[in-house]
Amino acid sequence: MFTSPLQSLAAYSAFLADLFERPTITRSTVSVWSVSPYTGVCEGEVWFRHGLRLRMREELDFDEAVITAYGYEVYRDDDKLFWYDDFPHPNDIDLAVTYPHHKHVPPDIKHNRIPAPGLSFEHPNLPQIIAEIEQLLFRTEALS
């Protein structure tokens, strides 16, 4: 039987420790802490090779086993490449398919939004985000 890592502070902390144990990650400041007996926050940065970095924050509800809010920003050195957030844009029909989940991309990164399939409140998003960063990393290494 599958047990969601979102069910407890201990389970999510162990999930993150396993997830971040990979050769593409050079260091992490991500930590998870309780805000109440039923809620928590996960926040920090993850550094990858070649100057790639993830800055992230998640608000967690362990009682319901869900992410209640999130933001994930990806940088190369100090340049923001893209970000994901769950801020609703109900009038943007192009985002309806993954509402409220979406990705901000260049050009005009603040206003240029696309759907974010795979992102959810019901399961951890970090494996998908890390896989996307690793694809960027591997493309960078292939060009080197």
Image (cartoon, grey):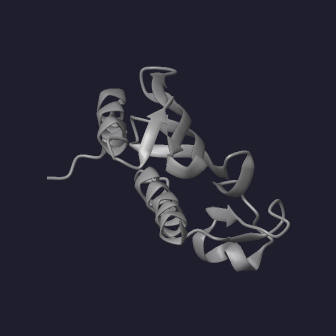
Name of the residue lying farthest toward the left = 1
Which picture quadrant has residue 93?
Answer: bottom right
Q: Residue at x 35, y 47 (%)?
A: 23
Q: What is the x, y in percent for residue 27?
A: 46, 34
The spot of residue 44 in percent (x, y) is 56, 33
Quarter holding residue 82: bottom right
Viewer-nearest residue: 86 or 109: 109
93 up-or-down from 8: above or below: below
Q: Residue at x 85, y 66 (%)?
A: 108
Which residue is outermost to the front? 144
Q: Nearer the viewer, residue 112 or 120?
A: 112
Say which residue appears at 51% left-offset and 29% top-offset. 29
Judge whether residue 119 can be spotted in this image.
no
Of residues 106 and 135, the one nearer the viewer is 135
The x, y position of residue 47, in whole percent, is: 53, 41
Count of marks, rendered view = 0
Q: In the image, is 87 to the left or to the right of 131?
A: right
Where is 124 relative to 5, above or below?
below
What residue lies at 49% left-to-right and 53% top-to-bottom?
A: 121
Who is closer to the viewer here, 23 or 121? 23
Residue 67 seen anywhere in this rendered image of the structure: yes
Q: Is residue 43 left or right of residue 64?
A: right
* Residue 69 % position (x, y): 59, 44
